[in-house]
Amino acid sequence: MDRIEVVAAVIRKDGMIFATQRGYGEQKDGWEFPGGKVEKGEDFREALAREIREELEVEILPGEEVCSVEYDYPNISIRLTCFWAELKDGSPVLLEHEAARWLGPEEIDSVDWLPADRLVLPYLISKE
């Protein structure tokens, strides 16, 4: 099975982290950090900014890499690379997601994270 490169934004604001609930596909209803696939030859941070524009109609400032994790779903194998990010301006508009929440540190486990995204959580705690 080929491994797909995926990037995600850990968007921070006022001590909270932005999480989105998938609105489509096999992983529908699972919670994730927003982002998507990296196109061939695309820089990871550029891919992340593009994906966030497409999914949330907002511009971000991708920052330092948080972590890179690998996970094998039944039909797809991914390497998920997450970056800290800040909103440039505006508020996210949900174009592909069912819901979104700003989660504080005590709420981080209050949503049903997708397996790959769940692997990112310990890195957030260690880098905060």
Image (cartoon, rainbow, N blue to C red):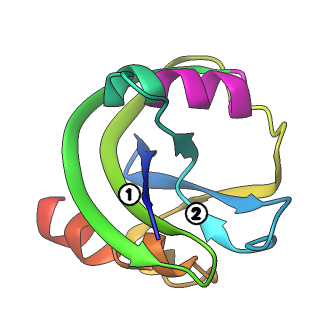
Q: Residue flagged by tag 1: what amino acid is it?
A: Leu
Q: Residue at x 85, y 59 (%)?
A: 23
Q: Residue flagged by tag 2: what amino acid is it?
A: Glu
* Circle on res. 32: 2
Q: Residue at x 59, y 30 (%)?
A: 52
Magenta stretch in the rendered image = 48-57
* Circle on res. 2: none
Residue at the limit of the structure toward the front, as seen here:
1
Q: Nearer the viewer, residue 81 or 32?
A: 81
| Residue 74 left/right relative to 99 | left
Image quarter where the C terminus lies is bottom left
Dot 2: element: strand
Foreground: disc 1 or disc 2: 1
Tell me where residue 87 appears, x and y as whole percent.
49, 25
Find residue 65 and report its image quarter: top left
Q: Residues within 10 Å of mark 2 (few under 14, many from 20)?
A: many
Provide the major secondary structure of the magenta segment: helix
The number of callouts visible is 2
